[in-house]
Image (spheres, helix red, strand yellow):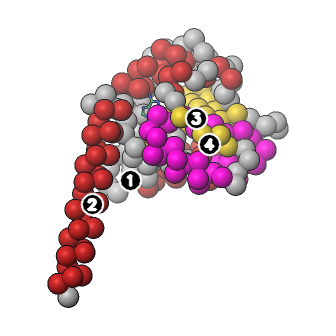
Amino acid sequence: MDIFLLLFALLLLIFGMLFGIYFFYAVFLSKNFQYPPAFPSFGNMRKQALLEAETFLSSADKSLKVIDLGCGIGGLLVPLAKKFPNCQFVGYDWDFFVVKIARWRCRKLKNVSIVHANFLQADLSSYDLILGFLGVKASQDLSLILQEKFKPKAKLISLAFEVPGLKYDKVIDATSYGMPLKVYVYHNGNNL
Ligand SMILES: C[S@@+](CC[C@H](N)C(=O)[O-])C[C@H]1O[C@@H](n2cnc3c(N)ncnc32)[C@H](O)[C@@H]1O
């Protein structure tokens, strides 16, 4: 019995240490949480964002290009890529560990590529649909980029955060687990 308790305590200690190390890595990467850490979209917010993306992709009569800015472990990309095998999906993330998991999850999906890089370096002018669960700072950065590089007729779906400087087409109520979250939908040509 004692040996099991000891093993359990040891496992807990190792897990705690790994989590601690990862936490400092995440703080460093996110520049003290100015940029969003690896936290997957969830609940009704994720559901509404996926529904909106699916409606847009279904309405097209050609193959579209989709990017998830900060794709995490692929919570948005994986279901969309499975449902729309004719479209091309790209996920950018700068977190080494989540990129490894996302690539493993997408290993059988030929229409997905996961890029280990800062999404601010992505050329957004070639994408028809942009997804992001970003945060205040990244939404501000994105706004500046999109004011120059937003493909005509392209759409942006922003989970939880409004993108300043762009006028949304609609705001979807996405209350999740009692939190009054929203999904913001934009298209090029609708600048403030
Ligand atoms: C809130 S999570 C969103 C995950 C995913 N989009 C989803 O909805 O499940 C944000 C992700 O963005 C990544 N990230 C934040 N800033 C980034 C940046 N400038 N470049 C690349 N990845 C970034 C983080 O590592 C994290 O995995």
* CA distance for labels 1 and 3: 29 Å
Q: Which residue is mark 4?
A: 53
The residue mark sitting in front, 2 or 1, is 2
Residue 177 image offset from top left, x and y in percent:
34, 57
Q: Is residue 93 magenta?
A: yes
Q: Which mark is residue 176?
A: 1
Front residue of 67 and 157: 67
Tell which circle, 1 or 4, labels the residue nearer the N-terminal end.
4
- Mark 4 vs ligand 1: CB below 8 Å: no
Observer-side mark, 2 or 4, equals 2
Q: Residue at x 27, y 67 (%)?
A: 11
Q: Which residue is mark 2?
A: 14
Residue that label 3 marks? 115
Q: Label 2 to label 4, Cα distance in Å?
A: 40 Å
**Mark 2 or mark 3, which is nearer the start of the sequence?**
2
Query: Residues under labels 2 and 1: Cα distance?
Result: 33 Å
